[in-house]
Amino acid sequence: MVVWLITRGGRPIRLHDPWHPSIYAYSRKPANLTVFLKNHDLSDIEQAIDYKYISPSDFERSKVLRLTFQQTDDIASFLRTVNSVNHLNVRLFNVDIPVSQLYLYEKDLFPFAFVRAQKSGDQIEWKLLDDAESCQYEIPSLKGASLALRVKKSGQISSYNDPLESITVKASDTLTEINSGSEADKLLELVKLIREIDPDVILTENGDAFIFPYLVRRAFQNQVLPQIILDREGRHLQPPRKQGKTYFSYGRIYYKPTSSRLLGRLHLDTCNDFIYEDCGLHGLFEVARTCRTPLHRASRETIGTNMTSLQMYQAFRRHILIPWKKNEPENFKSAWELLKADRGGFILEPKIGFFENVAEIDFASLYPTLMMKYNLTPECISCRCCAQTSTQVPELNYNLCEKKIGIVPHTLRILLQKRAKYKALISRNTDPALRSIYDQRQAALKWILVCSFGYLGYRNARFGKIDAHIAVCAFARKVLRETIEIAQENGFSVVHGIVDSVWLTRKDANEEDYVDLCETLEERLDLPASFEGIYRWIIFLPSKVHNELPVLNRYYGVFKDGEIKLRGIEYRRRDTPTIIKQCQHDVIDYLAPARNRGEFLNRLPGAFRLIHRYIDRLHNGQVTADELLITKQLSKNPAEYRHNVMQAIVAKQLLHEGAQITAGQNVSYILQRRVRGKTALPSELIGSTVEYDAQDYMRLLLDALAGLLLPLGYDRKMLANIVLSEKSSSQQQFVSQSL
């Protein structure tokens, strides 16, 4: 294993640690294992007897065979052979753990750990001077550089066959543009510049999907590929070994391009890194450290995969073998048992309309907290060792193991405790820079906690089982029902309740009353309850399709301290054009100072004047292309769309121009006036002038604003009439056509 260290002085050091990965084989019948060994050529594989827990539910270790390979690539070829001939009920374990993670598990290390390394013969002796559970840790001083390209496009979209125009590298406060000489000269100059800067991190935008594959192609065509070395290991840039993959997660299709690695450096692609985009660099460091996932891998894997790494580490340190393929089936249930069990969280429909002095109380990280508190993990649900227990799953009467704590609760304890510490550090720290760092870290942990519940029911989760998933829901339903009962006992009425939050009101109640209620909830439910604040006003919105039906998580309101909270409206959607987001935000921001319904209504004329300005901009063509872009995700490959929805029209245009488009990718476009039968134009094909369909955008704008004010009686038609009253005749015609 090659390990790169950064000294406290910022100097990179390369270490080589001779190390060989091991997998395990087990069969209930030793004779099967003997035949299995005879059927495979194991001459180059070291064999040894070991004792491990086969399942997390086991109380005694079993005799297993440890197979240690000389080369990591030998494991893959061995597994291909096993898959084709193994009919002996021999089970293999620890076979598909990424080798870099397996090394970290074995050495009990983690990325960005503070360590002392000492050479002992050929081996490296590690002394860990850090703790993955610590919240006060030091990140080494990393040198960074960002890399961008400009391409001489032969068409409207850049392709690998287009020649390179220039390369821009930014390091510290220095911006260097490589734009002279032949294409080969530019590529070689890039190599020289990277060698001089010697960055630890190279940041790109779309580096995995385009920049590095493009550089490989241009270097190959200019016969300089062996000289294009941007890493620290002396390996030239490599073409992608495989195509990017499309995958399905939480009801959506996603696309992930093949990652481009720079050995000895970190390559971060801002377009292929959810954690970095949402939680910043310090959030990414936190995930890598806590989950023991190398940063390059942590930045490109899903939150669930990172969380699974932490679970696998917990299993590894407890000598529990990690299954190759999930084999924990759902317990059999009758139709009646399924009806009782598979019900999700408890929901109380909100009352549509404008409300004053409503308070919000929620249980932070309720599901993970319940999973840890009640030991809700697959190996501890309906266990064989505890037939009669003091605590059972509500409504379902599953027994819960009381003799040991499962892997999932062990994992969640670390995440919950660290997040609570970060929130405490934020509340008592006055340094804005430190507060920002702590906030990025807690936000990253929050995403892992959010994911932890869903992974209990994920069919491919290593430590998941649907019975544990539905047990968490059962406890959560009980908690919310009891919360509502306790609130009503204390004179509060419930306006809305959803899964882990309730909105309450009581005449003349103040903050102390709600804080007292939280203390009562914590005492009686033994769960941390959080008082979020009292709203001056809050509006619960109806469905856009059926105006008489409420929507569970669609509202906006203003707390008494002036903080605005928005959920489920267009401003929160990624596919909403910027101009509509900005208009909706400006309107809410203008209405926010209102202290009650009367003041809210009095401020509406001013809000309508704001709307006039945006309508004028649309009508007069004073909107930029960036403000008009709509971004949609492709749920299918372009050819698979049966109907000409906008994203399909756009994707087919891009294909026609030579772009590579597949399911899971995002496409951005503007709505344009009908030109040669096309009603949408991809962002890549937008020229210097923007021919957009102002009336289409007017409809979107009025719909978004009417959605905010519908409980007060303002639909799209009424808003348009208000706008018409103050417009010229040409503008009135424009607005009327938008209806």
Image (tube, helix red, strand yellow):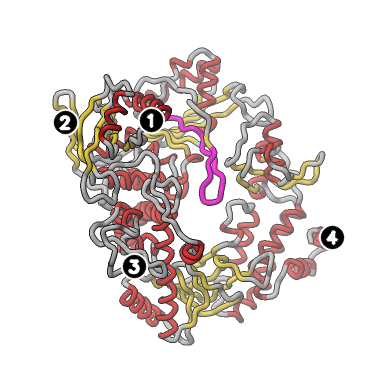
Residue type, mark 2 in image = Gln
Q: Which mark is residue 118?
A: 2
Residue type, mark 1 in image = Asn
- Dot 2, how many residues are within 10 Å of its Cα: few (below 14), some (14-19), or many (20+)? few
Q: Secondary structure at mark 2?
A: strand
Tell me residue 415's x, y (percent). 32, 54
On the image, numbered disc 1 is attached to which residue? 86
Closer to the eye: label 1 or 4: 1
Q: Which mark is residue 733?
A: 4
- Give whichever of discs 1 and 4 has the lower sequence position: 1
115 and 619: which is toward the camera: 115
Q: Secondary structure at mark 3?
A: loop
In the visual, does 381 lie left or right of 108?
Answer: right
Quarter of the image with the C terminus in it: bottom right
- Give whichever of discs 2 and 3 has the lower sequence position: 2
- Start-end of magenta stretch: 246-261
Residue type, mark 4 in image = Gln
On the image, numbered disc 3 is attached to which residue? 392
Residue 413 image-quadrant placement: bottom left
